[in-house]
Image: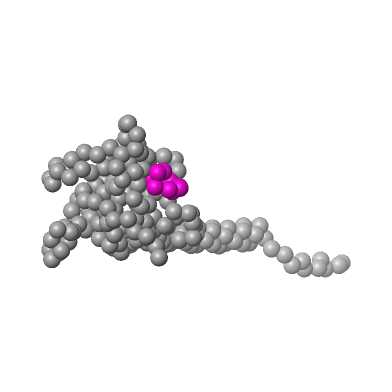
């Protein structure tokens, strides 16, 4: 009789065990990749937020330091153009000026009329700081935003009144989710040159301040990311809007 030849192979149990082990390894690898991707996304989000905060602070500094001493007629008031004034608006929630710095083109772009304003945040949570850029084509263009003059309640000198700053789809959000945001202005008295300048919440003098301070605080503190901080920008101007200057 012939003896049957032995045959090598695997049993069904061995196949099931191998498939199970391979499935466990695949699931473990997928979980490891998922955790790695989530960690990368969180790290990237924090880095982008830090860059956004640092970039916004740098933009604010450049915009204010690029102030141009424009003397404009108050052409937005009823009855025709009014007197000329140093174009600048400063109060705790609004700031208007002409700057040589542009958001789109930096220092190489066209001069812009900047409108910075503090508005309510999304769904009423805190406040946000926005900026509008309007092309500056000349003093008359800027003067259209002036609606007249009213006496200052403290010193009685006439100060220009401006149209309100309005948020638009083109408004750029410089800072968001803030507990508060307010402007103050380094004010000096030309009649008392030996008196040091002081910070005041509103600008009501002819000409331009020596500096602008923007105080900000986050709505929710987070030590793992950069937080909005107070920005202080000097203004290197020593001009008077009452004196005509001529280039030689």
Which quarter of the figure has residue 55? Answer: bottom left
Q: Does the magenta stretch include residue 135?
A: yes
Q: Residue furthest right?
A: 1
Say whether residue 3 is left or right of residue 158. Answer: right
Nearer to the camera, 132 or 40: 132
In this picture, which residue range is highlighted in magenta? 133-142
Taking the spot 42% from the left edge, 51% from the top edge, the residue there is 112
Up-down relation of residue 70 to residue 81 (above or below):
below
Percent coordinates x, y for residue 117 in the rendering: 32, 46
- The picture places residue 149, in percent across and down from the top left corner, at 24, 39
Between 42 and 4, which is closer to the camera in this rendering?
Answer: 42
In the picture, measured across the screen, residue 232 lies left or right of residue 62, that is left
- Residue at the (34%, 38%) spot, across then down: 81
Q: Residue at x 29, y 42 (%)?
A: 83
Q: In which quarter of the image is the C terminus?
A: bottom left
User: How are the colours assigned in the image?
Assistant: one colour
Q: Nearer the viewer, residue 139 or 172?
A: 139
Quadrant location of the N terminus? bottom right
All told, the count of numbered labels is: 0
Specify the quadrant of the image occupied by residue 222: bottom left
Residue 20, image x, y percentages: 58, 58
User: Would you say 129 lies left or right of 31 here?
Assistant: left
Q: Residue at x 32, y 35 (%)?
A: 77
Q: Which corner quadrant of the image does residue 107 belong to?
A: bottom left
Please say whether residue 243 is visible from this viewpoint: yes
> In this picture, is 183 found above or below 160?
below
Q: Does the segment drawn in magenta span residue 8? A: no
**54 or 115: nearer the eye?**
115
């Amino acid at each position: 009789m012939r003896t049957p030849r032995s045959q090598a192979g695997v049993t069904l149990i061995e196949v099931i065990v191998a498939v199970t082990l391979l499935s466990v390894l695949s699931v473990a690898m997928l979980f490891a990749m998922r955790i790695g991707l989530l960690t990368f996304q969180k790290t990237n989000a924090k880095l982008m937020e830090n860059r956004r905060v640092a970039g916004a602070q740098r933009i604010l500094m450049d915009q204010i330091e690029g102030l141009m001493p424009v003397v404009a007629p108050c052409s937005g008031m009823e009855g025709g153009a009014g007197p000329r004034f140093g174009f600048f608006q400063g109060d705790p929630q609004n700031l208007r000026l002409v700057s040589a710095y542009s958001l789109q083109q930096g220092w190489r772009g066209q001069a812009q009329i900047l409108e910075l304003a503090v508005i309510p945040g999304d769904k009423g949570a805190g406040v946000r700081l926005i900026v509008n850029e309007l092309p500056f084509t000349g003093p008359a263009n800027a003067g259209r935003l002036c609606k007249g003059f009213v006496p200052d309640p403290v010193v009685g000198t006439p100060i220009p009144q401006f149209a309100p700053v309005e948020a638009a789809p083109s408004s750029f959000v410089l800072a968001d989710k803030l507990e508060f945001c307010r402007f103050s202005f380094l004010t000096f008295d030309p009649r008392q040159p030996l008196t040091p300048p002081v910070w005041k919440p509103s600008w009501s003098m002819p000409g331009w301040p020596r500096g602008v301070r923007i105080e900000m605080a986050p709505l929710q503190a987070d030590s793992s990311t950069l937080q909005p901080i107070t920005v202080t920008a000097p203004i290197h101007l020593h001009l008077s809007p009452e004196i005509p200057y001529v280039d030689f």
